[in-house]
Image (cartoon, rainbow, N blue to C red):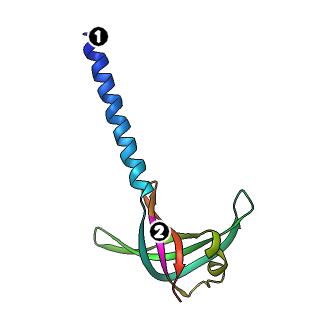
């Protein structure tokens, strides 16, 4: 009986480990997407190492149970693209190529290229 319980525990541990690996692997592989949307807000901040990054909030149209609504979605800019992103203006339209990922069940975007 004890041997059967130990086998069931081992199987449970393997199943949990596989579920965790699948979740992490899904988050690692982001896909590139084209975004074109109105800019709601642009802020320039410093990370913990003192490097600048830009957070652009864009409008995204969604629908749930037949109800259409608009949400603000963050698009983050790091590294070399910061100088371009800091010049974006609230109210203008952003057309860009972004890396789309998922964090805590929500889509997140990282700016790869701004299309002029």
Residue 99: in magenta span: yes
From the viewer's perspective, is 30 left or right of 85?
A: left
- Return the residue at label 2: 99
Q: Secondary structure at mark 2?
A: strand
Separation of residues labelled 2 and 1 (CA atoms):
50 Å
Q: Residue at x 39, y 48 (%)?
A: 23
Precedes in sequence: disc 2 or disc 1? 1
From the viewer's perspective, is 111 left or right of 14?
A: right
- Return the residue at label 1: 2
Labels 2 & 1 near each other (Cβ < 8 A): no
Q: Secondary structure at mark 1?
A: helix
Q: Residue at x 38, y 54 (%)?
A: 26
Q: Residues within 10 Å of mark 2 (few under 14, many from 20)?
A: many
User: Please, is residue 54 above or below residue 87 in the view?
Assistant: above
* Magenta residues (range): 96-100
Disc tally is: 2
Q: Quadrant of residue 66?
A: bottom left
Q: Residues within 10 Å of mark 1 (few under 14, many from 20)?
A: few
Percent across and percent down for residue 47 are: 69, 60
The quarter in which the N terminus is drawn is top left
Q: Quadrant of residue 10?
A: top left
Percent across and percent down for residue 80 are: 64, 73
Seen as rendered, the residue at the extreme top is 1
Q: Residue at x 47, y 77 (%)?
A: 97
Q: Residue at x 28, y 67 (%)?
A: 65
């Amino acid at each position: 009986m004890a041997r059967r319980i130990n086998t069931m525990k081992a199987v449970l541990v393997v199943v949990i480990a596989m579920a965790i690996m699948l979740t992490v692997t899904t988050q690692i592989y982001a896909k590139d997407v084209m975004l074109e949307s109105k800019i709601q807000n642009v802020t320039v901040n410093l990370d913990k190492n003192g490097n600048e990054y830009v957070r652009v909030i864009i409008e995204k149209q969604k629908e749930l149970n037949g109800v259409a609504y608009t949400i603000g979605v963050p698009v983050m800019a790091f590294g070399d693209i910061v100088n371009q992103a800091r010049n974006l203006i609230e109210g203008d339209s952003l057309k860009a190529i972004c890396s789309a990922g998922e964090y805590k069940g929500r889509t997140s975007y990282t700016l790869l290229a701004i299309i002029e």
